[in-house]
Amino acid sequence: FIACIFFTSKMAYQTEIVAMLSGGMSFRRLMWPYFVSALLIASLSLTLNLWVIPVSQRAQVAFEMKYIKKRVREHATVNRHIYRQIEPGTFAYIRDYTEQTRTAAFFVLETYENGTIVSSLEAANAKFDPETGRWSAPKSVYRKFEDDKEIFNNTQALDTLINLNTSELGRVEELVKTMDIVTLGHFIQQQRAKGSDMIARFEVERHNRFAFPASTFILTIIGVSLSSRKVRGGTGLHIGIGIVLAFSFILFSKFGEEFAKGGLLPPGIAVWIPNIIYSFIAFYLYKKAPK
């Protein structure tokens, strides 16, 4: 964006654009080289965002989780209260899961039919085995609800396999960054079926991969339209205004992401709002550009 402003402003300051327009070239024709360049940059950016960068970040994320964030993870619980849908009608509640010992202070597996609970399997100090994917505890309580009766069985040990991995219990934003667009789409569908409360964060990540490449065209129109007119301030004024617009665009993008993650706005709307706002700015500047 800054390079576009700098190049066009230099042409305007040397009255080259005035000569082009006076010679019969339309402003739309003048924009064609910029659009071709923007198309190449946007295509490259889209390819990198969807496929290349996520795969290349796997080694980086693995390194950070192993060395940089290791001490934090060893002495903290992933999430104090976790409630996930395992499959239709089956829910798991996990409290105070500690990643260092792979132990949950309290584990509950509930089954519902027609919105009514029919059974519950509860255990304290349940431990997760990453190799087998099973949760185990020395003692558990099985409760079955029939009509107005409640049947208890507290003699059996817990040894169960559920469709839930510890990577889904908390810090999955780092994991999501390493997924290509197809894997990310499948992961979001899986988490939505399980009732994850982090769907908005995953949707923000997916929309961002498309929104930023699309902004290339919008910022190109703004840059050319803004800097194509010769002004008294010259190149410095154009670059100054361009920097303000660029940083305000980034600021709007970050605000939109936080609103989406906080549940104040749908992720799709929140992520694309900066592009929508700056599309109107681009249209206005394009109409005001010298013809």
Image (cartoon, rainbow, N blue to C red):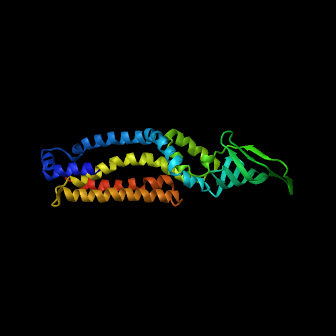
Q: Residue at x 44, y 46 (%)?
A: 209
Does residue 224 appear anywhere in the picture? no
Count of marks placed on residues: 0
Q: From the viewer's perspective, is 241 left or right of 181?
A: left
Q: Residue at the location (14% across, 50% down)? A: 18
| Residue at x 35%, y 55% (from the top left corner) | 278
Nearer to the camera, 169 or 115:
169
Image spot of residue 130 (x, y percent)? 65, 42
Q: Is residue 168 visible?
A: yes
In depth, the one of 285 and 72 nearer the eye is 72
Provide residue 137's location: percent of width, then percent of height. Answer: 76, 49
Toward the viewer: 53 or 68? 68
Query: How far across and down, in percent of the image, does residue 123 sit?
Result: 76, 53
Query: Is residue 212 found left or right of 235 in the rendered image?
Result: right
Q: Residue 173, position in %: x, y? A: 53, 50
Residue found 66% across the figure and 39% down from its top: 131
